[in-house]
Image (tube, helix red, strand yellow):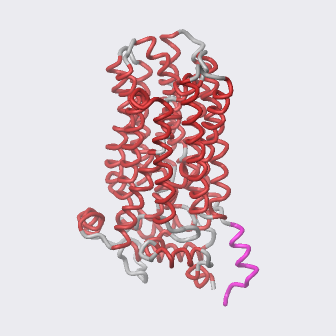
Amino acid sequence: MTMTMAEGKVQDVKTYNSYSLSCTIVISMITVIFGYDTGVMSGAMIFIEDDLKISDFQVSVLAGILNICALFGSLIAGKISDYIGRRYTIVVASIIFLIGSVLMGWGPNYAVLLAGRCAAGVGVGFALMIAPVYTAEISPAGSRGALTSLPDIAISFGILIGYVSNYFFGKLSLKLGWRLMLGIAALPSLALAIGILKMPESPRWLAFQGRLAESKKMLLKVSQSEKEAEMRFRDIKIAAGIDENCTDDVVKISKASKNEQVWKELFLKPTPAVRRILFTAIGLHFFDHATGIEAVLLFGPRIFKKAGVHKKSKLLLATVGTGIIKTVFIFVATFLIDKRGRRPLLMISAVGMVSALGVVATALTIAEQHDEPLWALVVSLVAVYTFVAFFSMGMGPIAWIYLSEMFPLRVRGLGVGIGVAVNRLMNATVSISFISLTKALTIGGAFFLYCGFGLLSLLFIYFCLPETKGKTLEEIEDLFSKKKKNVDAEARQPNPTQTNRQS
């Protein structure tokens, strides 16, 4: 054995690579912009309704169009990222965000505002697809969970900034305030489009293009040691269909292996593992939004108004509280994800969300039927914040972590794009239907419905999701090909592959 136990422990403790951490922080800027767009629209809609005199239906369309366009953006981004690389896809996303922000900041009428929101939505689709994929592909296995959760932390931080800007820009004139809220996002979009050019390309993407020398050079930068880089390089070559003993700087990858086979392998003739991965990705991102988180984030002022808060400034402050809770509790997942694992946090998150949603639904029903008693207002606020807290410590970030690490390299771009598309479709469904749903079922009834989906998500997590903590991206496909009882048993054991490779 060439490595002592003490040396092994040191390597286990040092799980973060400073270069990969720096890259992840920079890439997370694009999700800060997305989070800002989500959060700021929550308060901006209050002022847009007054200024442009739009109907509830137009408000619903404005709220949901971003996610409908993000659906298409995510599918396009998956293929684009496979052609031009992860880094340049981020540049494209930043430029699209820039165009959308300028249009919304101008916003002379509803049509232009909607066009800007749609453009921003395409940028959102790009961002949500590329940020977790890029992060997962440069991260060491021991810290991949924490690093991959950073873009979701950035989303929460962006939402909080959006809520805070609502409060301060809301003090300006009606015509200027909401336009500044929406248009100011153009500045960080421009800065990111320029700054991202200094970022490295994903080593896995480089290898898949046959650029092996560049891939290995990048792996040496983002790995903990030369030995780990060699191990990752070998696994990546195997995943890309390249002889693991190949020492060429550049090899030719057949077009069929890069393009034509992707749709066939993912949909027409998938392996049992890929079939299960695709089912899991779709199911997880269905439940990620079916429990109603977007209703709380986007329509928080309406919910709090139903609970008994009526003054605009207090409504906006209440949403700031939502942003603070979301940002704080997502750090729980970041610190625990690589220590406790994905499944335990998801199970705790789902149980907490179901409980909180039941209380929210009950309290809002009582508030609506009994002239908004003070205790119902307090219980509603606490329960909403509790729901956001449990979502943020589990379902929110971990759904993206699973998505970024489950798919094999050869289908990862398209697979993640499909997962993001499902996520955005559900987000759009909740956004567009919420106002109509509250009219048809009452606001309490809407949250009882979300609570029901929460119960289903708990069952889905228990039966369908294996533990991926500590596994390399190349090992996870094998993990999904195993039966649940074997997966659960292995999750409780040390990773033998990694132990053998370190020995």
Write down the region rendered in magenta.
1-14
Question: Hey, which quadrant is residue 434 in on the image?
Answer: top left
338 w.r.t. 171: above or below: below
Residue that appears at 58% across and 74% down: 491
Whether residue 465 is in magenta: the answer is no
Image location (x, y in percent) of residue 498: 58, 79
Question: Hey, which quadrant is residue 69 in on the image?
Answer: top left
Residue that appears at 58% across and 70% down: 470
- Dominant SS of magenta comes to helix
Q: Is residue 23 visible?
A: no
Residue that appears at 57% across and 43% down: 154
Image location (x, y in percent) of residue 310: 59, 17
Residue that appears at 35% across and 75% down: 241
Give the position of the N terminus as an image quadrant: bottom right
Left/right placement of residue 157 relative to residue 290 reads: right
Give the position of the C terminus as an image quadrant: bottom right
Whether residue 7 is in magenta: the answer is yes
258 w.r.t. 38: above or below: below
Q: Kindly give the residue lying farthest to the right in the view shown.
A: 6
Q: Nearer the viewer, residue 161 or 260?
A: 161
Image location (x, y in percent) of residue 369: 54, 24
